[in-house]
Amino acid sequence: QCPALRRLSCAGTVAAGLRREEQPSGSVETGCQDKTPTKTFYEEQDERREQAQRTVLVHCPSKISEKEFLKHLSQHGPVHSHFFYESFGLYAVVEFCQKDSVDSLLNVTQIPAMGMEAVIPFRSRFLNLKLKSPSRPVSEMSPIQPSNQLPPSNRKLSELLYSAESVDDQLSTLLKELQLTEENTRLRYLICSLIEDIATAYFPGCTIRPFGSSVNTFGKLGCDLDMFIDLHETRKLRTHKRIGNFLMEFQVKNVPSERIATQKILTVIGESLDHFGPGCVGIQKILNARCPLVRFSHQASGFQCDLTTNNRVALKSSELLYIYGSMDSRVRALVFSIRCWARAHSLTSNIPGSWITNFSLTMMVIFFLQRRSPPILPTLDTLKALADTEDKCIIEGNNCTFTRDLNKIKPSENTETLELLLKEFFEYFGNFAFNKNSINIRQGREQNKPDSSPLHIENPFETSLNISKNVNQSQLQRFVELARESAWVLHQEDAYLPSSSSKPPWGLAALLLPSVMQSTKKQKKRCGSERIKSLLESMKSGSPESSANTSRN
Ligand code: GTP
Ligand code: MG
């Protein structure tokens, strides 16, 4: 199965249901197409950004004729694509073919008149559609099919996994069900674009860029929207404005440090979002964090947003993960399953704390895939060696160079199945010498830990930093124990055949149920199979106390 799956890129997201006006109606794109992405990360970002600038978000009455709505909007120019979704009301995302059409629409859009309340006359591309006269009878309208922006319920997901044909099929199903859809990705870029409109009032030429799981191919429906304000373009302009022997500079205010500058920028943007940003609620300015940020909810999209400044290294990490996620279809399937497994057992959390983060888990999966024989993923140093001069990238003194051209990377010869990789992942980390070794995707090999943090995962670009510094001993221990239990569950192939008549939850479905994992603890003690005995032996020899414990001094 794997050679066929190999190079099956899922970097493009599913576009089911997206109406593209020039396509025959009902035409549907599918995700996971069998092709190597031809676009680089930045080409993809630029295209989507430009697309978002031609797009408006419209809150619609619940009963609306889609045809009339589109006809109304088409007065301003041809509509390229649109979709509806529900989130405390009905919303339409409408992409025009030309940006001028958006301007034309905004020119005829009114500031609403409120009875007793006053309004802040802020003009944005987030609009409200009102019906002047009652709509036609509902029976005359073809029903609107809103696109879904949320992940399936746990129950639905369990059912799907339960009825899958194999563990491989379960991993692919999980990926298909949870990955960001084309519509959801568009919505993410649109929200960034709307925030950018506010930020450019203060910082002309700035860009609000999404990063993290919204763009790195590992995003799950419902994940947060990380974005940062990129002032780099503004700075670049400044260095290029030379005329003859003269160098013109802006008059600026000075502050004692970069951190204070960041805090000031985020303060004004946070205030603007709070006072003027339609749909931006619950604004929190978390300015004393290591990486200061403004957190808010965007009500109409349901996204929890984190806005930071000048986070170019994080964008580079997102690009690196995008490349790794696009190289081999098994990468994303495995990362999604491991992330989901960790969430199901509360190894990860939405609340910051001493837990492992999704980012760290992704690094662990990449490292594991670099360690397979033959390797499924190349090391970061290999990607750096393949880079040409255009790929050279130094950010704040850190060498972030690697090739951006996927065609330069030879497909892996490895044909291991997802089922095997899942088992081996749990065994590998169930027995990893966390007490002395660190995980390092740059070199793709274990290295001595430079300090006593329980879990050490080297930051790929700022190599003196540990991305899992927050993880404490007891969280690591829980991870190790659950990895071992999970390896054990997966090794009981015979007991959990999908076709068995009693059909207990099996394979990945069993791993995602904390109750099943609890009961396997008991069963494990009664188990007599030679294979499991030897597995248990191997686990015993690397007991959590000896491998996960770091230092008792
Ligand atoms: P989700 O849990 O789906 O949101 O995954 P995520 O990858 O978006 O993680 P998160 O929102 O926590 O962080 C966003 C991005 O910030 C990550 O993708 C990384 O690029 C970066 N990041 C997060 N945590 C760390 C860290 O500890 N060190 C470094 N260097 N970067 C981090
Ligand atoms: Mg995130």
Image (cartoon, rainbow, N blue to C red):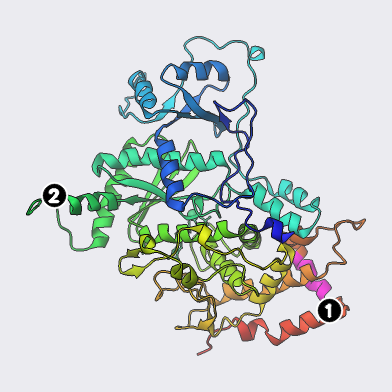
In the image: residue 486, left or right of residue 472: right
Type of amino acid at the residue the image marks with label 2: Phe
Residue drawn 50% across the image and 16% down it: 71
If the image is split into quadrants, where does the N terminus sit? bottom right
Closer-to-camera residue (198/116): 198
Mark 1: which amino acid?
A: Arg
Place of residue 338 in the rendered image (x, y in percent of width and height, measured from the top left):
64, 62
Dot 1, crowdedness within 10 Å: few (<14), some or many (≥20)? Answer: few
Start-end of magenta stretch: 517-524
Element at label 2? loop
Q: Which residue is mark 2?
A: 250
Q: Residue furthest left?
A: 245
Judging by the rendered image, the residue that carries numbered circle 1 is: 531
Residue under the point 79% across and 57% down: 166
Left or right of 485 on screen, residue 346: left
- Asked if one can make out residue 65 in the rendered structure from this viewpoint, the answer is no
Magenta region includes residue 411: no
Report x, y in % for residue 505.
81, 58
The front one of 176 and 191 is: 176
Q: Earlier in the sequence, mark 2 or mark 1?
A: 2
In the image, residue 522 lies in the stretch drawn in magenta: yes
Q: Nearer the viewer, residue 12 or 508?
A: 12
Quadrant of residue 514 in the image? bottom right
